[in-house]
Amino acid sequence: MYKVIYNKRINTNSFEMLVEAPMVVKKFIPGQFAIVMAKSDSEKIPLTIYDCDKEKGLLYLIYQVVGASTLELSYVTDSIYSVTGPLGVPSEICTNVEDYKDKRIVYVGGGVGIAPVYPQVKYLKEHGINVDVIYGCRNKDLMIIKDKIEEVCSNVEYTTDDGSFGEKGFVTNILERNVNKYDICVAIGPVIMMKNVCILTKKYNLKTIVSMNPIMVDGSGMCGACRCLIDGKPKFACIHGPEFDGHKVDFDSALKRMNTYKEEEKNKFDQMEVLLNEKN
């Protein structure tokens, strides 16, 4: 069991959890993730490591309630059954800082995708690299960690679909106006957002890295659930990723796979909601 310091709501359907997990954070490099289980019989949930305190052994996680497993996790108060990590390949930029010191870098975050953006931008600032950030959400109320992002980037621009904060429209609008300023783009967020960013950057020949978040089960490459088509070849996001060359990702197949279990997920969510309401 892993002690939970807090598990708090940070907007309508997103939560921040602080867990004591010294062995997980010890070797963490931005870009990696952890897999958690609320209880011994719970499903495994891959979550971005949003921040950590290596001296105190503290792990910060941000997650969005989108299914039965994350709904169950949102009810946790004092401990969780399992935390496995760090998993995945660390950020290409963060592991090769010296190669990127003279590069102009922009991070594009969508929705809760800003959570994995944060540790990378923070790490780069600590190593003398200042980057720009474009952050988009459906509306102002869904924005998270806005102040923390502003602390670590050199410049941040905001977009909302409804115009409730920042520029009305999409992240690609701002990116296209400034695309010639950058040598590399990192996009993290909804698959459709990353797809549209890559369509744009490919037109301008701007190198783009994306972080894929497909269905994942064991995090070891054994189950094959998280496979993505990269340059026409199958890769597993849990062991080959989550980062890939965005111009080589088959986003259409990724979107199709993500929708495979929509009806089953909804039914499981409804069942879990009833169960948790009865218990609480």
Image (spheres, rainbow, N blue to C red):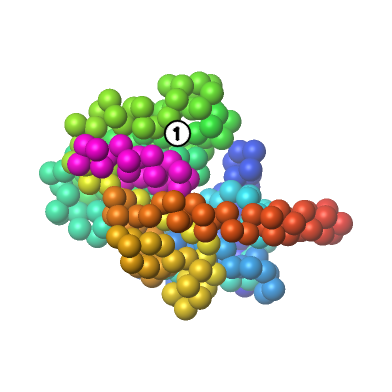
- Say how many tags the image has: 1
Residue 33 visible, this angle: yes
Give above or below for 146 relative to 81: above
Residue 22 visible, this angle: no
**Mark 1 burial class by Cα count in 10 Å: few <14, some 14-19, many 20+:** many
- Figure quadrant of residue 106: top left
The image position of residue 205, as x and y in percent, is: 20, 41
Give above or below for 156 relative to 93: above
Left or right relative to 45: residue 227: left
Residue displayed at 43% across by 21% down:
167
Residue displayed at 59% across by 41% down:
10
Residue displayed at 31% across by 51% down:
246
Foreground residue among 132 and 206: 206
The image position of residue 219, as x and y in percent, is: 48, 71
Look at label 1 and name its amino acid.
Gly
Foreground residue among 183 and 255: 255
What kind of element bears circle 1? Answer: strand
Q: Quadrant of the N terminus?
A: bottom right
Residue displayed at 38% across by 62% down:
229
Foreground residue among 171 and 150: 171
Whether 122 is among the magenta residues is no
Q: Quadrant of the C terminus?
A: bottom right
- Figure quadrant of residue 53: bottom left
Q: Which residue is mark 1?
A: 136
Left or right relative to 61: residue 231: left
Give above or below for 64 relative to 182: below
Q: Which residues are magenta?
A: 186-205
Q: What secondary structure prevails in the magenta region?
A: helix
The image position of residue 148, as x and y in percent, is: 42, 39
The image position of residue 95, as x and y in percent, is: 24, 60
In the displayed orientation, state which residue is furthest to the right: 278
